[in-house]
Image: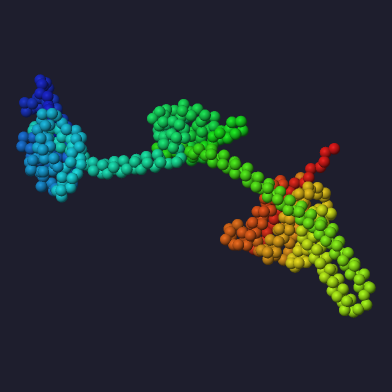
């Protein structure tokens, strides 16, 4: 490309200066040398730019439309070797998809001026259509006019643009079809203010606003309550820290929930703030109603349990006072009848009847204690638990010990009943599931509460073993106890590990002392 030399004009005015000995003034010789050096540097820069340009560049001589030079990118773009292009005329290289556009291009430049970034389709040596931005301008080289033709390949750009368009379409469809409201904000004034950039359909429905009416407007201008309920401050924190934040907003009026929104706020890499939110007011109302229904059911279940206990006591009392006494009278009559008989066979029959009546009396007493142990009502909770432990020790070969402090334990009758039944349920669970040898029951007064701790040395259980039926059965029993105690103001605490035994603590409120 040594023959490509951009022409630079040199002024020839009146020259004054000393003769250099050859009839040429010295200052003229120096200026000529400087001009040559400047021209050489210019040629060097031009050549470097031409060869290293990322665009495809070709130089065409204007007078005969012959390609005199191309760079490597031009050769790669069209798929021809340099020698296949240089020396050919502009019309011989059929690289334009539109042949008419190619034929008129150079003539139009002479008439209408340079072409700048005209989108043009080309055909390479393999017939592949390529898209480029074409620029053509004239330039004097070696005192001759030339065309400099540059093509910037935008196929890759088109692929990126199409991918971006598809991505934008997917984003738009995703955002607009989300059930959650989505608002996108641009931070202004160093994150102190936020301007609406996007607003999806769900947000329009929730807020009763139109997207076109709020885009570009200040957030606080549209939602003044954002300051009062801390949402603006949440935006600022997220914008500064980059950490996502959950920010619920609950609005009450006259102690009634009016609005409840859950906001999930995060910052995009671009610095924009996104607020994804849901209006869950209806769900909160439903949850509130559900809690009320649950409390009513819990109360009903507790009342039914207490009613059942009262019926148990009533039946046990009837068994003891009526059936038990009647059986005792029958037994006494048998004794009297036996004394009046002389026949051995009749005496034997009376003895059999006496034994049957005796066994029936014993069974009635056992049933009475099973239904409602009188010791609970006559001697109190501690004595009843002590009796219960003795019964389990005798029947199930389970060593049971009971410890109690000497402090008074004033309890309402309902709580005494629930605690007694709860301890019994725990002992039944231990016998059925724990494989324990020892059980220890500790009864203590702690401030305003009574604490009953039941500890066994059995196999224990773990919440992770939910698949085990024994665990489910045991948990159901604990659930029943928990619900009954909670209704009366108490609670249940469980501490257990597989292979380490179980410790269950019942906590119930003591009865407040009567005020004079």
Would residue 18 be seen by someone viewing this image from the given angle?
no
Q: How is the image coloured?
A: rainbow
Q: Is residue 509 above or below residue 273?
A: below
Q: Position of residue 141 (x, y in %)?
A: 11, 34
Report whether 403 appears left or right of 87: right
Q: Position of residue 367 (x, y in %)?
A: 78, 62
Name the residue at 80% across, 55% down: 376
Name the residue at 77% across, 46% down: 510
Report whether 167 appears left or right of 38: right
Name the residue at 67% across, 54% down: 480
Comparing 314 with 220, the one in front is: 314
- Rendered-image quadrant of the C terminus: top right
Report whether 337 appears left or right of 276: right
Report whether 88 appears left or right of 173: left
Q: Is residue 136 above or below residue 11?
A: below
Comparing 401 with 39, the one in front is: 401
Quadrant in the rendering for residue 472: bottom right
Quadrant in the rendering for residue 37: top left
Q: Position of residue 398 (x, y in %)?
A: 74, 65
- Rendered-image quadrant of the N terminus: top left
Name the residue at 81% across, 57% down: 318
Quadrant in the rendering for residue 51: top left
Would residue 300 be seen by someone viewing this image from the given angle?
yes
Comparing 489 with 336, the one in front is: 336
Q: Is residue 332 above or below residue 116?
A: below
């Amino acid at each position: 490309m040594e023959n490509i030399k951009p022409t630079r004009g040199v002024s020839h005015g009146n020259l004054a200066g000393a003769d250099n000995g050859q009839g040429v003034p010295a200052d003229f010789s120096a200026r000529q040398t400087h001009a040559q050096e400047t021209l050489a540097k210019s040629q060097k820069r031009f050549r470097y730019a031409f060869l290293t340009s990322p665009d495809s560049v070709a130089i065409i001589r204007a007078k005969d439309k012959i390609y005199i030079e191309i760079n490597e990118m031009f050769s790669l773009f069209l798929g021809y070797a340099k020698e296949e292009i240089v020396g050919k005329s502009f019309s011989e290289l059929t690289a334009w998809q539109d042949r008419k556009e190619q034929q008129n291009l150079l003539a139009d430049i002479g008439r209408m001026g340079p072409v700048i970034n005209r989108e043009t389709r080309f055909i390479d040596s393999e017939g592949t259509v390529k898209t480029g931005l074409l620029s053509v301008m004239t330039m004097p080289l070696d005192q001759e006019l030339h065309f400099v033709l540059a093509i910037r390949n935008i196929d890759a750009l088109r692929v990126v643009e199409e991918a971006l368009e598809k991505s934008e379409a997917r984003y738009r469809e995703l955002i607009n079809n989300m059930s959650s409201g989505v608002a996108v904000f641009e931070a202004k004034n160093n994150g102190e203010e936020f301007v609406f950039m996007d607003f999806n359909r769900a947000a329009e429905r929730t807020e009763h606003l139109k997207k076109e009416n709020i885009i570009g407007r200040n957030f606080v201008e549209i939602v003044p309550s954002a300051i009062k309920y801390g949402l603006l401050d949440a935006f600022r924190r997220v914008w500064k820290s980059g950490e996502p934040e959950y920010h619920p907003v609950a609005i009450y009026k006259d102690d009634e929930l009016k609005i409840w929104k859950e906001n999930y706020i995060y910052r995009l890499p671009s610095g924009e703030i996104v607020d994804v939110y849901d209006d869950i007011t209806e769900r909160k109302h439903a949850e509130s109603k559900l809690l009320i229904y649950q409390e009513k059911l819990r109360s009903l279940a507790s009342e039914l349990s207490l009613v059942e206990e009262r019926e148990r006591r009533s039946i046990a009392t009837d068994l003891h006072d009526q059936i038990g006494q009647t059986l005792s009278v029958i037994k006494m009559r048998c004794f009297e009848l036996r004394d009046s008989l002389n026949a051995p066979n009749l005496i034997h029959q009376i003895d059999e009847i006496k034994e049957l009546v005796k066994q029936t009396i014993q069974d009635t007493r056992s049933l009475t204690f099973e239904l409602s142990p009188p010791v609970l009502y006559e001697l109190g909770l501690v004595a009843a638990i002590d009796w219960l432990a003795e019964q389990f020790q005798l029947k199930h070969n389970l060593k049971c010990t009971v410890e109690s402090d000497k402090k008074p334990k004033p309890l309402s009758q309902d709580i005494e009943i629930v605690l007694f039944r709860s301890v019994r349920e725990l002992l039944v669970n231990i016998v059925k599931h724990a494989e324990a040898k020892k059980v220890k029951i500790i009864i203590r007064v702690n401030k305003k509460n009574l604490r009953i701790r039941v500890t066994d040395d059995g196999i224990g259980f773990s919440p992770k073993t939910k698949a085990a039926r024994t665990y489910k059965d045991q948990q159901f029993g604990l659930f029943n106890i928990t619900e009954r105690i909670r209704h009366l103001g108490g609670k249940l605490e469980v501490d257990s590990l597989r292979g380490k035994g179980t410790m269950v603590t019942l906590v119930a409120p003591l009865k407040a002392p009567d005020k004079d």
